[in-house]
Amino acid sequence: MSRIVVLGAGLCGLGTGMMLARDGHGVTILERDEASVPDSPEQAWERWSRGGVTQFRQAHYLQPGGRAVLESELPDVATALEAAGAIRFDALCMMPPTITDRAPRPGDERFMTITARRPVLEQVFSRTAEAEPGVEIRRGVDVQALETRIYNGTPHVTGVRTGSGEVLSADLVVDAMGRRSQLPRWLAAVGCRAVHEEAEDGGFIYYTRYFRSADGTVPRPLAPLMAPIGTFAIVTLPADNGTWSVTLYISAGDRALKRLRDPELWTAVVAACPLQAHWLEGEPITGVEPMSGVIDRYRRLIVDGQPVATGIAPVADAWACTNPALGRGMTFGLMHARALRDVVRQHLGDPRRFAEEWDAVTEAELTPWYRETVAENRGRARDLEALRNEREPDCPTDGPAALNAALLAAMPHDADLFRAFLAARCCLTPLYETFAREDLVQRILEVAHDRECPRLPGPGREQLLALTSPARAEGNSSRALASARR
């Protein structure tokens, strides 16, 4: 039996570990955070501290593409999530009212997903993994370095060394440490060449608040879950047990809007969005939680056709991480974990072949999704900057960006084009595959002719600045102080 060490007991580390264990491998999952797993999902929400997970209490969403992997590979986890209060959400419910053809299509079930808050998801994943034969989870273990030897002229990872000096040997080490992974530094410390890395600040700040209904229901979407409105965007995500999140995100350079951390100003902006205001109709169960410094980052361990090291495989956010507003992180991670399980089946016994195949599969199956996500992030950042400076955003005239703009203009008027758009949003079919179909491109161009991308209603820049003005913020502070004195 092969021994595999997985670094990180987040969602993707646990999912990877369970998939590998179900293939007959012995799996040890090491987690730096020492807090034990709470007994219930609600206790996880109320009390669980996960310092190693930046976005633990931020908005979270599993795309339908991720749900498909979960139900295929870890069906018991999907069942346990629903038992814990996760709800099924059909993304087709967001079909615009301008589409008159509402007839179902074969395959529409692919747009269904399962939604829950991050602590609830992680509690269920953890409890399932703890009961998994062949999986050992050790919490409070701080890994400090990699153990290596030279194999056919290349550093080969043979295990890890912990802060206590313990060495754990492994046939494969999986890096599932997420955005904070220190793998490049660790590899450099054992004499490896530099990892290929691309990184850029997405340039966004997020302000998130969670709500709960009195009757266990969640609001019905009247607009896309991720809705750009002028110089900000609003993200509304259903969760579990009658809870949901609302997030406002802005350009990091938009100083005037950084006052959105004030709950009253935040509420005023959401209330001014006609298609999202009803998401305020619940009890707030958090304050306004900010998050910034979100990096789009991509790593590759094959450089100039040669592996930097063998015996190591980064997965999920440790490989590439993106803007969380599109809700793709967990889905990418589950897709990547399944791919890793498949490559391990074929090539674990040949370290060089494994490294090459793992890189090739990742580049073919995951990297196109990463590139499309980053391209959208960059486009959105440019649009925010243009609008903030009272300029109309540039309209692309050729290439994939122009086709994407045409699809955005066409999809509110054609049921099948809406599904094509939604398939990309839901991580089911990447846009490059959609745009490779000549018949579909022709249809997109025909329907988009003389149509512009729809603009969702909401506060313009002048109203937005009024809603978040310093005077209004100071008034809120004065009222809060007076209330506290009383």
Image (cartoon, rainbow, N blue to C red):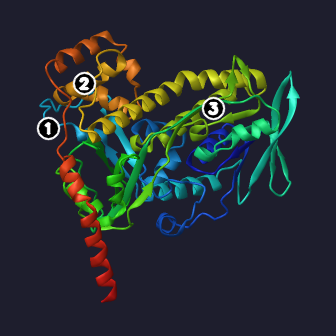
Q: Earlier in the sequence, mark 3 or mark 1?
A: 1
- Quarter location, residue 377: top left
The residue at which mark 1 appears reads as: 97
Which is nearer the eye, 28 or 427?
427
Disc 3 to disc 1, C-alpha distance? 41 Å
Disc 3 to disc 2, C-alpha distance? 33 Å
Amino acid carrying label 3: it is Leu
Amino acid carrying label 2: it is Leu
Residue 130 position within the rendered picture, expressed as x and y whole percent measured from the top left: 64, 56
**Which residue lies at the image location 37% right of the left edge and 68% below the top edge?**
285
Q: Is residue 147 visible?
A: yes
Residue 76 vs residue 479: left or right?
Answer: right
Residue 245 vs residue 123: left or right?
Answer: left
The residue at which mark 2 appears reads as: 417
User: Which element is circle 2 on?
Assistant: helix
Which is nearer the eye, 437 or 395?
395
**Which residue lies at the image location 77% right of the left edge and 36% below the top edge?**
188
**Which residue lies at the image location 48% right of the left edge and 24% below the top edge?**
368
Q: Is residue 131 visible?
A: no
Residue 7 position within the rendered picture, expressed as x and y whole percent measured from the top left: 69, 46
User: Quick one: which residue is furthest to the top in this view?
Assistant: 438
- Quarter location, residue 413: top left
Instruction: In the rendered structure, find residue 340 and report the number of the disc placed on it.
Output: 3
User: Which element is circle 3 on?
Assistant: helix
